[in-house]
Image: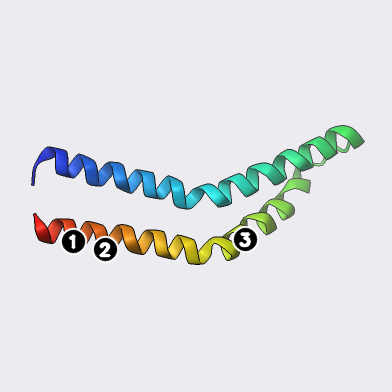
Amino acid sequence: MTIEFVVDICRKGVQTTLLVAAPMLLAGMLIGLIVSIFQAATQINEQTLTFIPKIVAVFLALLIMAPWIIHTVTSFATGIFSAIANF
């Protein structure tokens, strides 16, 4: 194995991880922003108000995107195994 091969595998691994985590992170960030705007508009300063909507949004995003996540991770693992076998 060359250094370039290992660096390419690591780069693809980090890229796949960020790609797979993005829908849940974006859902949590969007709901957090909406709740923060609501809190600022109504002057409700409850810190725990954001937890339940964020948890629900992340869970729904995970349920909706689960087939795509499984396919992406499976194709990444298959690509890694075939690249190692062909090396």
Please, what secondary structure does the residue beneath circle 2 have? helix
- Give the total of numbered labels: 3
Mark 1: few/some/many CA within 10 Å (<14, 14-19, 20+)? few
Q: Amino acid at mark 3?
A: Phe
Q: Amino acid at mark 1?
A: Ser
Q: Of all residues shown, which one is farthest toward the right?
A: 42
First along the sequence among labels 3 and 1 = 3
- Determine contact: label 2, label 1, CB under 8 Å: yes
Viewer-proximal residue, 69 or 36? 69
- Tell me what residue is drawn at x 12 percent, y 38 percent: 3
> What residue is disc 1 on?
82
> What residue is disc 2 on?
78
> What residue is disc 3 on?
59
Task: Write down the quadrant of residue 55 in the picture.
Answer: bottom right
- Tell me what residue is drawn at x 17 percent, y 56 percent: 83
- Tell me what residue is drawn at x 64 percent, y 47 percent: 28
Residue depth check, mark 2 versus mark 3: number of the one nearer the observer: 2
Please provide percent x and percent y for residue 29. 64, 42
Question: Measured along the vertical axis of the image, is residue 7 above or below residue 59?
Answer: above
Q: Amino acid at mark 2?
A: Thr
